[in-house]
Structures are given as C-alpha cells and as structure tokens.
Image (cartoon, rainbow, N blue to C red):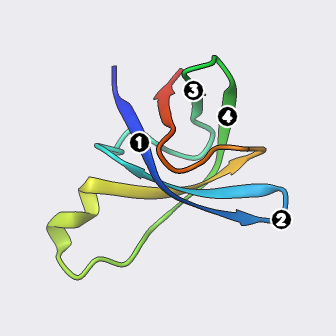
Amino acid sequence: MDIFKIIDTFRIGDNLSVTFEGKCEQIKNGTKLTDNHGNLYMVVSVGTTRHNNPSDISKSTTVLISPSTLKKGDLLYIQ
C-alpha cells in the first residue's frame, strides 16, 4: 500500500492545496484518498511544483483536494 505523507498545505477557497511526499505516479484527477480515520478525500486537480533538479520531480507532488481539513504530517492512502 502506498503511503503519502503531507509535507505542506495551502487553503484555496473551499479547497486545500496539498503537497505529498512519496511515489505519486498513481495520483491523478479524481483519485480517492483516505486518511488514518477513514475520511475520504477527492483529488480535484494535480499540479506541478518547481524543482531545480529534474530527479526530484518524482519525490513529491501537489494536488488540490476538496474539501479538506488535512494538515502537515498527516498520512493518506489511495482508496
């Protein structure tokens, strides 16, 4: 099971921009994620972040999640 650790969040209206640490190739628009408490989150959009080293791109990804009260350090899993 892939685990995604939240390393940063930023509120955008009712949604939350969330940056994950981990192999995020499976994350795409519409992906359903759950936390340790069984709460369900929907990925609205996958974004890209700037990296100076191209090999760093696969280490994290930023997504827009709706709705969300997640915070830095939380763990998510693909449902």
The residue where tag 3 is placed is: 35
Q: Amino acid at mark 2?
A: Gly
Q: Could you say which disc has been placed on residue 5 in the image?
A: 1
| In the foreground, 5 or 50 | 5
**Residue that extends furthest to the right in the rendered view of this protein:** 14
Q: Give residue 55's quadrant in the image.
A: bottom left
- Residues under labels 1 and 3: Cα distance? 10 Å
Q: Which mark is residue 13?
A: 2
Q: Look at the numbered discs 3 and 2 and tell me whether their residues touch, using CB distance below 8 Å.
A: no
> Which of the two discs, 2 and 4, labels the residue nearer the N terminus?
2
Number of residues whose C-alpha sits closer than 10 Å to that of mark 2, classed few (under 14), some (14–19) or many (20 or more): few
Residue that carries the numbered disc 4 in the rendered image? 41
Q: Nearer the viewer, mark 3 or mark 4?
A: 3
- Determine whether, in the image, residue 63 is placed left or right of residue 6: right
Kindly indicate whether the residue at mark 4 contacts the one at mark 2 (C-beta within 8 angstroms): no
Tag 4 or tag 3, which sits nearer the N-term?
3
